[in-house]
Amino acid sequence: QSEGDGSDEEGDEAEESELLDSKYLSVRLGQFQPLLLLANVSGSARITLSRPEALSGRATNGNSFRPRSRVRGLEIGSVNGPLSAYLGIGNGPGQNEEDNHMDIYATIERDIGTTGSSIGAYFYSGEAVLEGEEGSFRDSFRRYGVIGNLTAEKTRLIGGYLLGTNDDP
């Protein structure tokens, strides 16, 4: 192979095309974070010692859920080229085996190009047992948002916008 004949570029394009055409299913069982959050903002590739407040903050009513909280349960995922979707069900934080309520979450992510850039949506619906003056009660809550990253040759810019509601403020 000689320099400048374009064969490396053709090989790279074939690999990129193959990656974008990938199709598979995945299953995770155990204790884990939603993959969209783990891969983009909560995993090991952090520069700072702390996680973003949007992922670590809790509601002011005593609910211990945080978007980065682990779920103990089952996740089923599907990748179809640049699109991936995951659905999870399990016990959220502060729940135990006597608590039969299951939290659910769903994420969807779209890869943009072949450099690792993506945009995704996140939804979580759960319940937490809270202690009040009249005993314990359930707080139903939902979290939703958009998370994305722009990956360039030597730079990765990550951002997101998360919202939430609690039935017991």
Image (spheres, helix red, strand yellow):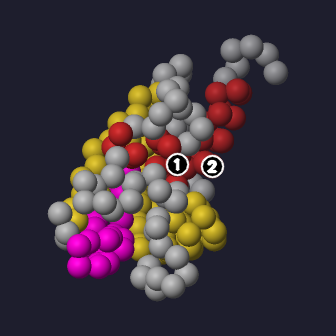
Label 1, label 2: how far apart the Cα atoms are: 25 Å
Quarter placement of the C terminus: bottom left
Pick the residue in front: 27 or 71: 71
Identify which residue is drawn at 66% across, 41% down.
15
Q: Is residue 135 magenta?
A: yes
Residue identified by numbered label 2: 18
SS state under label 2:
helix
Residue 100 at x, y percent in the picture: 46, 85
Q: Which residue is rendered at x = 28% and y = 68% of the image?
A: 141
Q: Which residue is mark 1?
A: 38
User: Answer yes or no: do the residues labelled 1 and 2 have beta carbons within 8 Å?
Assistant: no
Seen in the picture, residue 37 relative to 31 is either above or below; the reply is above
Image x and y of residue 129, in percent: 36, 74
Quarter of the image where one finds residue 66: bottom left
- Residue toward you, 153 or 6: 153
Foreground disc of the pair 1, 2: 1
Q: Is residue 100 magenta?
A: no
Residue closer to the observer: 112 or 167: 167
Residue 117 showing in the rendered view: no
Counting residues from the start of the chain, the first of labels 1 and 2 encountered is: 2
Say above or below: 153 vs 141: above
Query: Which quadrant: the N terminus?
Result: top right
Question: Residue placed at 56% from the left, 69% from the top?
Answer: 72
Question: What residue occupies the far top of the structure in this picture?
Answer: 3
Query: Residue at position x 41%, y 29% from top?
Result: 157
Q: Which residues are magenta?
A: 120-143
